Amino acid sequence: MKASMDDLYLFMLTVRHGGISAAAMAHGLQRSKVSRRLQELEKALHCQLLIRTTRHIELTENGQLLYQHISQPLTDVNHAINLLESQQNSLQGVFRLASTASFIASPMFAEVLDAYSRQFPLVKLELLYLQKSVDLERENIDLQLLPNMAEIINLDYVQQTFLTSSNGLFASPEYLQQHTEPKSIAELQQHWLLASRYNATLLQEGTRLRLVSEDINIIQQMASLGQGIALLPNILMREFLQQGKLVQVLTDVNYSDIMMTLVYPSRRFLPEKTRAMVTLLRQKFADK
């Protein structure tokens, strides 16, 4: 499907007038027609150009690129269209991924990044440490990974669960040599606990918390150093259990599962570099 020059002209008018309604009124057009033609343009170019709000519009990164060329000679316009199509379909350029510090720091996520970089060496990875949902379009972020307890600010975004893990209690062998290992939840009250901001809410009232952190890696290290018993996702602790750095206690106590969610702006305009990362993440954690 080719982009229509008429639709490109309507796009230019919309940007210049600062909104669809203003552009339609200034040129004696129906707002619904302008809106529909802009949607057809995005469909033809396989990417989102505008962020629509109630009163005005904003340009996405792709929209800015197109507008920079739109008032130039026709050869430049065609070049811009080809560039957009190439960006959407190619596995190169910059891929910006946001996630909690704890997940980015996990060995399993490092394995995903390693596989992605080996398969797609022309893609530059930019990792952002974000604990809360953000406006991906305005922040120019391709993909965000969030725990299920985080509230997604834009319900129109695509959300896919890709990892579910139970939580467990972990302590270092040295800590258990110096303290009586708890055999019940009641005895757990006699120990210092380490937990993430999300997991801390799962603990009983009155629990003595020594550390609450966004970074699971820090919690794990503090537990390994004997600073207390840590409540952590089981899936991320397997390596430390195998190495003997941690021991799981109260294995019969069940805490609510934690789930990680993939969040991205649009299934319809999903660039290939994003699709490739989504596929790798789902494959890596599918059977965990």
Image (cartoon, rainbow, N blue to C red):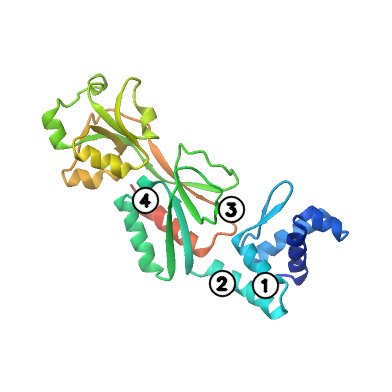
In the displayed structure, would residue 271 be above or below residue 215?
A: below
Secondary structure beneath dot 2 equals: helix
Observer-side mark, 4 or 1, equals 1
**Type of amino acid at the residue the image marks with label 4:** Ile
Observer-side mark, 1 or 2, equals 1
Instruction: Find out whether the residues at labels 2 and 4 contact each other: C-beta distance under 8 Å.
Output: no
List the residue tagged with mark 1. Answer: 69
Secondary structure beneath dot 3 equals: helix
**Which label was assigned to residue 86?**
2
Disc 2 and disc 4: Cα gap in Å? 29 Å
Q: Residues within 10 Å of mark 1 (few under 14, many from 20)?
A: some
In the displayed structure, would residue 137 be above or below residue 42?
A: above
Name the residue rendered at 49%, 68% in the picture.
Answer: 93
**Type of amino acid at the residue the image marks with label 1:** His
Name the residue rendered at 44%, 43% in the picture.
Answer: 131
Observer-side mark, 2 or 4, equals 4
Rendering coords of residue 120 (x, y %): 41, 68
Rendering coords of residue 275 (x, y %): 49, 60
**Type of amino acid at the residue the image marks with label 2:** Ser
Q: Residues within 10 Å of mark 4 (few under 14, many from 20)?
A: many
Res. 155 image quadrant:
top right
Disc 2 and disc 3: Cα gap in Å? 22 Å
List the residue tagged with mark 4. Answer: 104
